[in-house]
Image: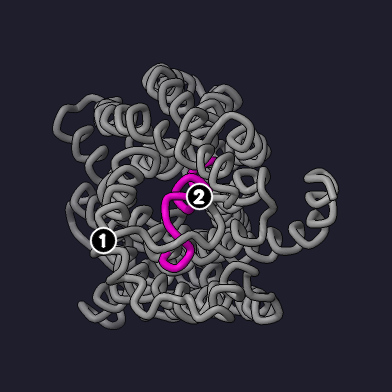
Amino acid sequence: MSNGTRAHDHQPGMVRIIATSSLGTMLEYYDFFVYVALTATLTHLFLPDTDKIVATFAGVATFGIAYVARPLGTIIFNPMSDRIGRKRTFVITLALMGIATVGIGCLPTHAVAGVAAPVALITLRIIQGVALGGEYGSAVVYVMEHAPEGRKGMSTSVLQGTASIGLLLALAIVSILKVSLVPSSFEAWGWRVPFVISAPIVAVATWIRLGMTETPIFSQMKAAGRLSKNPLQDTLSSKSSWKMILVAMFGAQGGTSVSLYTSIVYMLYFLQNVLKVDPTTANLCLGAAILIAAPFYPAFGKLSDAIGRARVMLIGILLWIVAVYPAFAGIKASASSAQWVQVSLLIAVLAILTAMIMAPLPAFIAECFPPQSRTTGFGLAQQLGNVLFGGFLPLISLTLVDWTGNPLAGVGYSIASLLPCLAVTWVWGLKQDARVRRLERHAGQPASGTERLPAR
């Protein structure tokens, strides 16, 4: 049977696998990013301060705290994925995220509970971070290990778009509520709705995931008795795994974190806090840009299947570095004259280039590790890179703007952060691409197969 026929036979099943995996992951990102869309409201209700600048920084820092918790989720759940199965693990993480999100929607505010309110908010944000840290690696590996050869980049790239779509959904729901409710009603109870409504959706998504089958590769390893008893130890004690973790952290994952959290997350803070754009208008501009960029994820993922993951990401990083400062300057000028279509299009340019960096990343990192510890290695590389490059990027960028008085100062930090990512992807990322191609051609065994654990 030809490769084309095999791909065709896999297609209906793969569509279902990608759709169900993406739905759950999108909901997790929605739950996580509702906080971003409601930062100003939550800061006012839970972190009151007479100094508005201090209060803003506190709210943004609470966003970053969840990123510190994400590696903990990786350490807890990703080895579980390698021991008991990809499917079981991302059912647990989805349920945990749903519980934490609904919990935030039910919290008493500072006016009612005093200092207990921000403590509870931060605790639930940490739980959200733990859940998301364990979710994404399991979902990516689940999709990748089902995908046929030659389509792994495109199949996993869809999951990368779920972060933006989750944020878009959060922005849309918050915007609708703000437009529909008077300010006093929104502050009294309306802000709780985006958190609480995730409960039935998460319940349905969990039920769907319970009906999914385990990956063929994991099932084969389990039947052959080749599962790792301690994937975390195997990864941390392996020199080759550490090399791949560092290559991903300081290369492709760093590039993804900087570009995503500058173009999407910091962009929202930039519009609202730096340029003083009305929150609803800022949400609409960002939402339009996300919709424009969404179809580019599978397109760039497919391109990475054809010419290599690192090559696509490298081109994306270069173009993003060139485009980011003129784009932010153009957004500043356009916002001052209320040219919102132009603002949306400039954000879309950055979002599309971000998609070019992000789309090949899941397959690139997953191919760096053997299947016995693949989810563990993937999670460590991704979450450590996120913490180092992404989690506190909005806070640092806003601090630079405040210190210098230059609205574009934060963009300089993003460009500087991307330079080592560019170098590492260029030098070591391209070598990883070549290694994967070589294994597929000469070893008669795909890089995504059941190769042995790396030598320690």
Residue bearing mark 2: 362
Q: Residue at x 53, y 41 (%)?
A: 360
- Whether residue 95 appears in this view of the structure is no
Which residues fall within the magenta stretch?
360-373
Q: Residue at x 76, y 63 (%)?
A: 16
Residue 362 is one of the magenta-drawn residues: yes
Q: Element type at marker 2?
A: helix
Q: Residues within 10 Å of mark 1 (few under 14, many from 20)?
A: few
> Is 244 displayed left or right of 97 in the figure?
left
Location of residue 283 in the rendering, given as x and y in whole percent from the top left corner? 53, 44
Q: In terms of depth relative to the viewer, which is nearer, 41 or 371?
A: 371
Residue 210 is one of the magenta-drawn residues: no
- Whether residue 62 appears in this view of the structure is yes
Q: How are the residues colored?
A: one colour
Res 456 → quadrant: bottom left
> Is 318 displayed left or right of 441 in the figure?
left
Residue bearing mark 1: 456
Q: Residue at x 33, y 35 (%)?
A: 274
Numbered label tally = 2
Above or below 207: residue 301: above
Above or below 262: residue 141: below
Mark 1–mark 2 distance (CA, rounded to whole Å): 24 Å
